[in-house]
Image (cartoon, grey):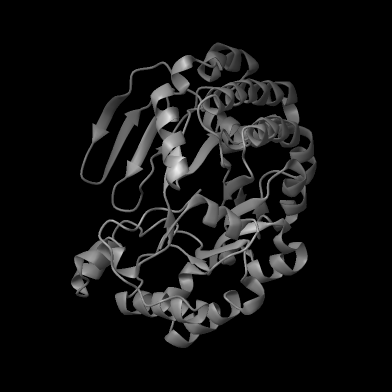
Amino acid sequence: MLYHREQYLAHLLGRGSEREIFVEQFGPLIGLEAEWRRQGASEDELTLDAFDFDRVELCRLGQTGPRGDQTPVVEFDSPEYSIHRDAMGRRMKLIKSTATLPLPMDYPVETMEDWQRVRHWLADAPDRTQEDQCREAGKRREEGALVLTSMPGGFDLPRQLMGEENACIAFIEEPEMITDMLAAAADTACAVIDRIAEHCPVDLLHVHEDFAGKSGPLISPAMIQTFLKPYYQRVWTRAREAGAEVFSIDSDGNLNPVVDALLDTGINHIYPMEPAAGMDIVALRRKYGQRLMMKGGIDKHVLRQPREAIRAELEYKLQPDMRGGGMVFGLDHRIPNGTPLESYRFYVYTAREILGLPPACPRKGSWQRMAF
């Protein structure tokens, strides 16, 4: 079903909902398409159009992240992997058989002097927004599209510039540098939101962090309070003034130790809610109610287990207490390799049955990523 933005927000914010929302957030991992072809998948199944997932049309506006000034260049390319230098001068390696995103091999910032040298990458500029796109988004919003803009992650930005280990150290040993990075990012994010709002209201502010693993987050509640809270709240205040009601964070891993701290910053929506890392959407709903909106939460790994396990997972996660708003149901990340097509079909059809959704009606071009 294609949702109107007002319907989608009403469901998410608990203002009333005609039915539950069932999505596929990210789509399949590389290699799964070939597996499913061998198992007799139709073209509509390969594109996920056959499963009639719910969606809302999106308008993504503004560019707020660092903009390097180096010319990207490919250094090596083979059928197995490629290495290129990106606009920030990082050597990026992509393993083609298993990955969709390249990983940095080195980083441009180690010291405060390095940061000052590249600080202009975060400077605002008029071309970070496109006036015609903002006007068009305003029209599409009236027709039902959801308007969102993003801000750099308070942890992810230092990580992109310094690498994960050095960023963790910098939060302790170089607090002035981290504070200045986030101040520069906030300046630009607020300026971008202001220009968008001249032509079109904003519905959702999004921040990508991915700052947790199975054992827990890489940043403590105290660090969130000291560094991320002032940064988040400054940008979120501006986004709310522009009309936003949802402040969404994207992070895999075990966020349980920092959920309270995140809610205190203004975050009110978390995805993809990874069960393998201990994120139990049922327990979180019981603890936080609809103060915490969530998307995802269904264990992707259960798809490689017997049907009894799939049904048990769905009956637990889709139970009546989880319905009625504030929750968008879906897998907690990409559909893993080794997922039998028949098991995925069973998962979709059983979830639709439990949620009281009509049988799937394939629609060409209907599936879209719902990761936001």
- Image coordinates for residue 356, horizontal then vertical, percent: 49, 79
In the figure, 182 relative to 156: above or below?
Answer: above
Residue 273 visible? The answer is no
From this viewpoint, is residue 266 visible? yes
Q: Residue at x 50, y 40 (%)?
A: 147
Of residue 98 and residue 197, the one placed in the foreground of this image is: 197
The residue located at (64%, 17%) in the rendering is 112
Rendered image quadrant of residue 1: bottom left
Q: In this view, does 83 lie above or below 112?
A: below
In the displayed structure image, the side of residue 320 where residue 262 appears, left or right: right
Q: How many numbered marks are there?
A: 0
Q: Given the current orientation, which residue lies at the most extreme bottom position?
A: 308
Side (left or right) of 175 relative to 106: right
Please provide percent x and percent y for residue 372.
Answer: 51, 48
Residue 50, picture quadrant: bottom left
- Residue ID at (20%, 70%): 42
Please state the horizontal and vertical placement of residue 339, each as a whole percent of the image: 36, 72
Taking 67 as reference, is 332 above or below it?
A: below
The x, y position of residue 228, in whole percent, is 71, 35
Q: Which residue is more in the foreground, 306 or 110?
A: 306
**Viewer-closest of 30 and 165:** 30
